[in-house]
Amino acid sequence: MRTLILKTASDYLLPILLLFSIFILLRGHYLPGGGFVGGLMASIAFVLHAFANGLKDTKKLLKFHPGFLMPAGLLLSFLSGLLPVILQDAAFMTGLWLENPIPVIGSIGTALFFDVGVYIVVLGVTLTIIFTISESA
Amino acid sequence: MEFLLAIMTGVLYAAGLYMMLRRSLVKLIIGLIIIGNGANLLIFLLGRITKGAPPIIPGDTKFFADIYADPVPQALILTAIVISFGLQSFAIILIKRAYQVVKTDDLDEMNTIEEEV
Amino acid sequence: MTQQFLLYPLLWQLFLSIVLMFAWRHIQIQKIISIVGSAIGVGLSVALFYEVWQNGTLVVQAASWKAPFGISFVGDMLAATLVLLTSIAGLAVSSYSAASLIPARLRFGYFSIFHFLILGLTGAFLTGDIFNLYVWFEIIIISSFVLITLGGEKAQIEGAVKYFTLNFLASIIFLTAIAVLYGLAGSLNMADLAILIPQIENRGLVEVAAILFLVAFGIKSAVFPLYFWLPASYHTPPSAIAAIFGGLLTKVGVYALIRFFSLMFVEDVLLDQILMVIAILTLISGGLGAMVQTNVRKVFSYLIICHIGFMIAGLAMFTELAIAGAVFYLIHDIVVKTNLFMISGLIYRIKGSNRFKELGGIYKEYPKLSLMMIIPMFSLIGVPPLSGFWPKISLIIASFDTQSYFILAAVIFASFITLVVVAKLWAEVFWKDPDKFPKKNHFLYFKKMTLARKLQMILPILMLTGVSLYLGFGAENIQQLSIRITSELMNTDFYINAVLPNN
């Protein structure tokens, strides 16, 4: 699958797709989207890159093993759920929100961090699965 | 619409069961995937299909004035899809590994451990 | 503060597995974190148990959404007891697997996935929402799939294919049942459903949903005629993994059956009769299966099936005493079955095999260890005053009260068969003079282990033996506990009012 067209395109597509996946992630609070879909999209960006340039290049680009993303994302989601328990003695995963929304990102609360955690976990899991399958194939 | 979906669910269940009863390992997994999709469709069907407004109450009222789509079945289906995504990718790795180790696709021949009682 | 305490055992296990995932490559560190963490987990569960015992049911509405809309977590006496037992079994198996599993298996994140399994079990016991229960079941089966295939030997893969297929199918049936019930009642909260289900007019569909739940949980808990995946797969993984499977995985199914059929689908005559037939056939077929096997772990696998029958029998008779017997048996069974599979692993370490014809003479070599191993087997049979005896008394009295003499016969028959099986096991494994078999070259025999490793294997067995001795000699306390659990179960208003206070 190493064609010049795909290779050139994927160089431009990778940042665009990643940016789009973050857009989908942030948009998820009120509109269709969210961490799961965003994470899948981000992993598709890397998979496309791997198709065009080979697995080695993509791994070099990532710099660390994608499996590391799983505990990192889980920890972020876990802590965002735990925050209300620690701060307010409210139930696990109760939403805490900053009062004033921030431009571009929108309102910031624990739900956003939970979703970011999901995004990271999905990215990590999908990339680990796909890398493992394509390595052993 | 409900009628079509009901038939579709039935067909998916039947097709899934039929595939599961085959002796090939690959067909078994395909059968499980199909029957899982049937279950998701059943949740969608039994959650009442409504062509209505999204389930968001306008700021100035306190109750739903109009009919609205139930958001719960969609959440359930999404969760079920995500879970079966994980299970299916596991299953595919498993059958690949099983084929490498046992060197057959035939379920009837996967009984070496049973024979030596 | 005290309400939030309910989720601490759950969150702690999640936290442990995340930390263990960070330490993916450092097996030694993982071992220490896992054992210390499990010990802290036991501490948290004891505290939860004490709290529930003193102050009654704890309820947490996750994310603070009000009861029928959000997901409720309910810690009544039954859930708290089972969470406690899960954490005790988890501690034992964590220490045991640190000593008995070879590093090749531990390298692929064994401990992290093990704690995910414990997390799933804890969650399944605590949740008060049927769809959330489905999610916990999925967490349990996904982690058990990984554990059962870890190592990737031929036998394991073959066992895993069967295990995977039937458990996946059970989940789909569970999902179908949830769909039907949601379509009928429009709610997923167990307490809310307990109010709504009696009001549904379409009784036929309610019955269908109940049967679907019965089949789904029946596959999970390995009752007749849905148990065939269990003996085909439980003897394939290493015994540490089989211990946690045999001790807890089938019991989650039994827990779900007890919860569903005492809270939501009550007073259904057809269902009681089906349960009764299932119980009798499970007792008989499991017992007969155990008779003919000649592999220690296959014998134990069939005994699991056989003894599931006791709990189902208690549920089928559905009197106060019968349920108390079933609950007591559940408590006893978790401890003993976990212990038995660890013992089979110890036998494997001593002799290098689990087949009868290659075993023998263990009593001569290790008399003290053999005595330690026989205590759980005796409590399995129910020799008075050990722990298996007391719940059977309750079951037998209850079967006289309800005049279900078939159950009475099956209970006694199954007890005798267990006795025969254990006697045969004792003669074959411990007494018989062993045939000379060539020693395996690259096998770490028990004799060659360092003292620390030996202790790591023996102490968990000793601990669980101690627990089952306490269950036997302190039977009065446990009986009191089971009767309290039963009164909470039988009086559904209790559960409903705890979850939905304004109803």
Image (cartoon, rainbow, N blue to C red):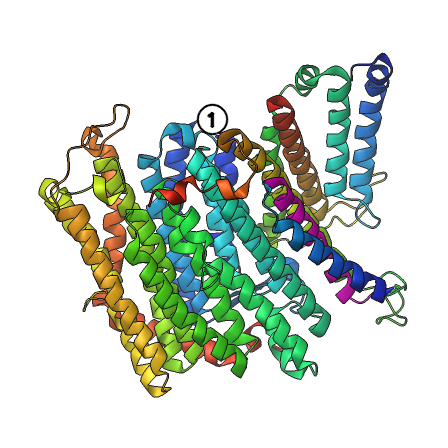
Which residue is at the front of the view, C182 or A61? C182
| Image: C222 above or below C96 | below
Residue plotted at (27% across, 28% down): C443
Residue plotted at (83% across, 14% down): A3
Which residue is at the front of the view, C422 or C470? C422
Residue plotted at (53% across, 29% down): B100
Q: Quadrant of residue B65?
A: bottom right
Q: Main secondary structure of the magenta part?
A: helix
Which residue is at the front of the view, B105 or C72? B105
| Image: B94 above or below C141 | above
Direction from residue B76 to residue C254 in the image, left or right: left
User: Residue C341: where, in percent of width, then height?
Assistant: 32, 48
User: Residue A14: where, in percent of width, then height?
Assistant: 80, 23
Q: Quadrant of residue C358?
A: top left
Please give the residue where the numbered disc 1 appears in the rendered image: C25
Q: Amino acid at mark 1?
A: Arg
Does the magenta-highlighted stretch encompass residue C500?
no
Residue plotted at (62% across, 50% down): B20
Figure label count: 1
> Residue placed farthest to the top in the image?
A4
Which residue is at the front of the view, C297 or C327? C297
Q: Is residue A91 visible?
A: no
User: Residue C490: where, in percent of width, then height?
Assistant: 47, 80
Magenta segment: B25-49
Q: Is residue C178 visible?
A: yes
Letter of the chain that mark 1 sits on in the rendering? C
User: Residue C68: where, in percent of width, then height?
Assistant: 66, 69
Direction from residue A28 to residue C473 in the image, left or right: left
